[in-house]
Image (tube, rainbow, N blue to C red):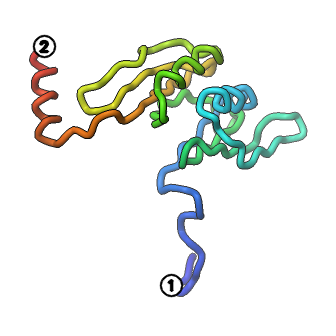
Amino acid sequence: MQSVTSKVKPIPEGYHSLTPIVTVEGAVKLIDFLKQVFNAQEEEVYKGPDGRVIHAELTIGDSILMLSDANPEFPALPAMINVYTEDVDAAYRRALKAGATSLREPSNQFYGDRTAGVKDAHGNQWWIATHVEDVSQGELEKRMKARQSQ
């Protein structure tokens, strides 16, 4: 337990309160995919004697994603993750080139983001977004009502 006078930060430097963990069969392939699509940077990758990834941390933008190969304690589970990027259209094209399948082509959304969706070879859904418009709460509610009445 941390003492009140301790200088150790409860959230380590460079991390946020929420840090996703993705487990897949074939973590090395997912790491390569994330590097190609989101310019992910490897911070650390630990492999077992069999070459499987025990633990990896990648930085995407200002956030850290943890991942590993599945094992009996942590089975492979598909995830759905939203990633903000500078250029959703370019990231979407890179994802398709890297082998992802399209879930939604890039399009502007009523809430001010331009979004696209892809699914990687492991079944994970990556929702890619670029914020293109600041929308007030009042305007957002108006657009939501208009959308629901369609």
Which mark, residue 4? 1
Dot 2 corresponds to which residue?
150
Q: Give x and y (percent) for residue 47.
A: 82, 41
User: Badge 2, how many Cα within 10 Å: few under 14, some, many 20+?
Assistant: few
Q: Give x and y (percent) for residue 82.
A: 45, 34
Compared to 12, does 41 lie above or below?
above
Task: Find numbered disc 1 in the image and state the secondary structure of the residue it sits on.
Answer: loop
> What is the spatial separation of the Cα atoms under label 2 and label 1, in whole angstroms?
55 Å
Q: Quadrant of residue 100?
A: top right
Closest to the observer: 49 or 75?
Answer: 49
Question: Extreme bottom residue here?
Answer: 5
Compared to 99, does 8 lie above or below?
below
Compared to 145, does 139 lie above or below?
below
Closest to the observer: 24 or 33?
Answer: 33
What amino acid is found at the position of numbered circle 1 in the picture?
Val
Q: Quadrant of residue 121?
A: top right
Q: Give x and y (percent) for residue 127.
A: 45, 27
What amino acid is found at the position of numbered circle 2 in the picture?
Gln
